[in-house]
Amino acid sequence: MTRAIKTKIPGSILVRKTKTGKEYIYYKAYGEKGNYKALGLEFSNKNIKVAEKTLEHCYKEYLMKSNKIDDIPLHETNNNVYKILSEFIDANRTRGLTEQTLYEYRLSFDHIITEEYDLDSYNILYKNGRKIKQLSIEKDIISYVNTTTHNNNTINKHLRQFQLFVNFGAELGIISPVNFYKKYKKKQIPKEVVAYSIDEAKAILKFAKEKDEVFYLLIKLYYLTGGRLGEWLNAYFGEDPHNVDLENNIIRFRNKIRRDLYQTVPIFPELKEVLLRLKELEEERDDYKGKVVPYSATNKGLINKKLNKIEKQLGIKKKGRSTHGFRRLLATELFKNEIPIDVIKDVMRHSSIDVTLKAYREYDNDRVRKSMEGLKRG
């Protein structure tokens, strides 16, 4: 069943009900031909506003391209930081990012940037170049970090997403290539991550397989690859800019910070069996076309809630459990099997060996102690 949603912004929004009873939002921009596009979000008043913001952005682009407006609003002028934001959003949309993700990028930008920045000389790094002043951006970042009421986790999230914008501008040669995230990120108390045991993981998989095949296959993806929750919720079948390439037997996961870069993972036989079954299920369904699993990127809470429910029924519920427990399990097993640390770093797709050692220090210390105990000296 399909129903239209009234909107004051040119364009149209539809809500379609799936066989499961869930409702999802679709949109078509003003002047655009073809089918409606999936927003990737379930119906709610909040998500309708996200759709309206998308329509508004598309309509402004239409007017500009059609030369129907000369006086472009402040946040759409041709020579300022907001114009770069517009290009950044468009570039990421063509790479397949969901509208929800793009909305989060814009939200982080709005939290930090307070005014228009005209392009100006920045001769320290670029002789005779015209760059957005680093000092202007940095001033806003410092102000945000020092005055916001957000907790450290939220501050770092907005800084990470804003850094993607900075990286994009640097690639265009418009913004100075400075790692503001590294410079201003806040210290965080790491969340306690409790790894599953092999027996617990197998019990969860067996239970899920009997109740919900798709959820079982999703959990098995985490179990086999140690992938992060958001990575598999954003995964698509096909070539770049999507993730799973069954023809060439590789998975391309986007880098956490540099979204234009990828980290590749080979598809081994047991993993391919899971992916081929998910591909069969994808071809049978009408919604979430192309996606590896029929969940949106915003369903992280739902996935962990389902997982926690299974834990309770199995009597293995512990504080700190989440899908990340499967990632920790994989790393733990690699350490126990004395896999070289550089290989573990590549499997876990950490930025450096130091990150791997920091995350799994207890296992490394245990390995060092055993090595020292077995050392023979004349």
Image (spheres, grey):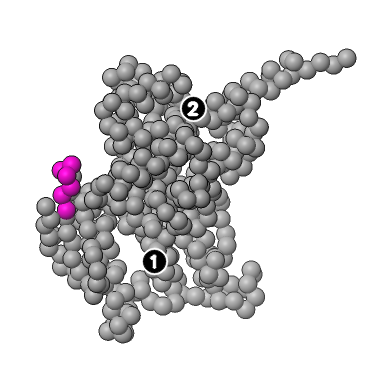
Report the predominant secondary structure element of the magenta stretch: loop
Asked if residue 46 shows in the view, the reply is no
- The front one of 276 and 229 is 276
Q: The residue under label 1 is which amino acid type?
A: Asp
Q: Earlier in the sequence, mark 1 or mark 2?
A: 1
Instruction: Tell me residue 38's x, y (percent).
Output: 26, 57
State left or right for residue 159 relative to residue 334. Answer: left
Query: Residue 17 in magenta?
Result: yes
For image coordinates 39% across by 50% down, the residue present is 236
Asked if residue 330 shows in the view, the reply is yes
Dot 2: element: helix
State left or right for residue 368 relative to residue 55. Answer: right
Instruction: Tell me residue 29's x, y (percent).
Output: 24, 69
State left or right for residue 217 relative to residue 163. Answer: left
Instruction: Tell me residue 270's x, y (percent).
Output: 47, 34
What is the number of the mark on residue 329?
A: 2
Q: Which residue is mark 1?
A: 90
Name the quadrant of the C terminus.
Answer: top right
Q: The residue under label 2 is which amino acid type?
A: Leu
For image coordinates 56% across by 55% down, the residue present is 179
What is the number of the mark on residue 30?
A: none
Dot 1: element: helix
Few, some or many C-alpha atoms within 10 Å of disc 1 (few <14, some 14-19, many ≥20)?
some
Instruction: Tell me residue 321's x, y (percent).
Output: 39, 27
> Given the current orientation, which residue lies at the most extreme right position?
378
**Magenta-highlighted residues:** 16-21
